[in-house]
Image (cartoon, rainbow, N blue to C red):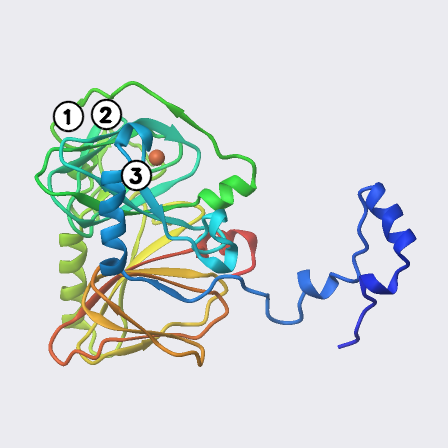
Amino acid sequence: MQSLGTLEDLPQSYRDKLTDLNLVPLWPNMRAVLPHKVPSRKTQTLNWQFDTLRPLLIEAGDLTPMEKAERRVLVLANPGHGLTNMQATPSIYMGLQLILPGETAPNHRHTPNAVRIIIEGEGATTIVDGEPCIMERGDLILTPSGKWHEHQHDGDGPIIWLDILDLPLIYQLEGSWAIEGKTQTKVLERDKSFAEYSAAGVVPELDFKRENTDSPMLRYPWTRTRACLMEMAQHYSDSPIRIAYVNPENGASLFPSIGFGAMMLRPNETLSLPKRTSACVFHIVEGQGSLQVDSNDALQWTEKDTLSAPGYSEVTLSNPSATEPAFIITADEAPLHRYLGIF
Ligand SMILES: [Fe+2]
């Protein structure tokens, strides 16, 4: 590869004239923005270990009352992107959120899409456009772009969940904004999408019409996903046991920006994922094991941990248990890469 001229090759007087006119020469940075064959990746392979982070999150509950936080969150910031940029990957924001018994995270809505994965606690509810969604361990609860949402917690202990948003992408597009609203009135005892989409392959047809809306299902219960993975394992002895979370009306990914999935690692299973362009994050619902990216040292993980891995990488997950399966929820930027034609 031919080396190109550097900034230092240019006289300072010339560089100053360029700066005054808001100009920069491309060739000194050409290789940085258009590297040959493989893109440069800032996303670092990391494990945010839940047991290490939990005390700090609980401490935040003592230090900052909800009215001073609105959302009491510790952001899982990937240092490769700069901590203050709040990126786990180029397009994915992740945060651990805490609500204490009796607290409410007030109603708002915003342009970024959000999913929360429940990690710990019982008795909390997310109300989405008037529909109360019960929050149980491993559930995915969606608040798609523009939908009102607030959180209430009537249980005994703290409730903690993982937020996953496309905030970095929407922010970079200068399209990120939110507005606050009055507390919602629950229109139902529980979310209607739970009833409408509770049977696989069955969708509501009201007034002889299909709605075919974006993200019509708001809660994806973990108990059903887990049961599906266990059942699939009975039918496939060699294939990876994976599912994709989709819009049940049209099979599309939950959001245009982020795709979600879940997998089961059988006892003693090692799974090398197909090499993909997009970065990925992993949340461990059950089990213990390791994550290896390319030839780097493997990271050990256990239940409730959350990990990141860059794209264009060989990712291998291992479950060393001889008796217990491991269950992992994944999120990646594949839908966006596909749309852009770079997948
Ligand atoms: Fe929100």
Task: Name the residue rendered at 87%, 65% in the picture.
Answer: 9
Label 2 sits on a secondary structure element that is loop
Q: Quadrant of the N terminus?
A: bottom right
Q: CA distance from mark 2 to mark 1?
A: 7 Å
- The x and y percentages for residue 36 are 67, 71
Three-letter amino acid code of the residue under disc 2: Gly
Categorize mark 3 by other alpha carbons within 10 Å: few (<14), some (14-19), many (20+): many
Write down the residue under mark 2.
130
What residue is shown at x 21% (from left), y 71% (from top)?
A: 288
**Image spot of residue 8 (x, y percent):** 83, 63
Alpha-carbon distance for marks 2 and 3?
Answer: 22 Å
Q: Is residue 116 above or below residue 32?
A: above
Looking at the rendering, the quadrant in which ligand 1 lies is top left
Sequence-earlier tag: 2 or 3: 3
Residues 235 and 176: in front is 176
Q: Helix, strand, or loop for circle 1?
A: loop
The residue lying at 17 percent from left, 35 percent from top is 125
Secondary structure under badge 3? loop
Q: Position of residue 192 (x, y in %)?
A: 18, 32
Name the residue at the front extreme. Answer: 63
The answer to whether 291 is drawn above or below residue 254 in the figure is below
Is 54 above or below relative to 300? above
* Pointer 2 with pointer 1, Cβ within 8 A: yes
State the mark number for residue 41.
Answer: none
**Dot 2: few (<14), some (14–19), or many (≥20) neighbours within 10 Å?**
many
Identify the disc placed on residue 72.
Answer: 3
Q: Position of residue 61 (x, y in %)?
A: 23, 40
The residue indicated by pointer 1 is 188
**At label 1, which amino acid type do we have?**
Leu
Residue 323 appearing in the image: yes
Given the current orientation, which residue lies at the most extreme left position?
156
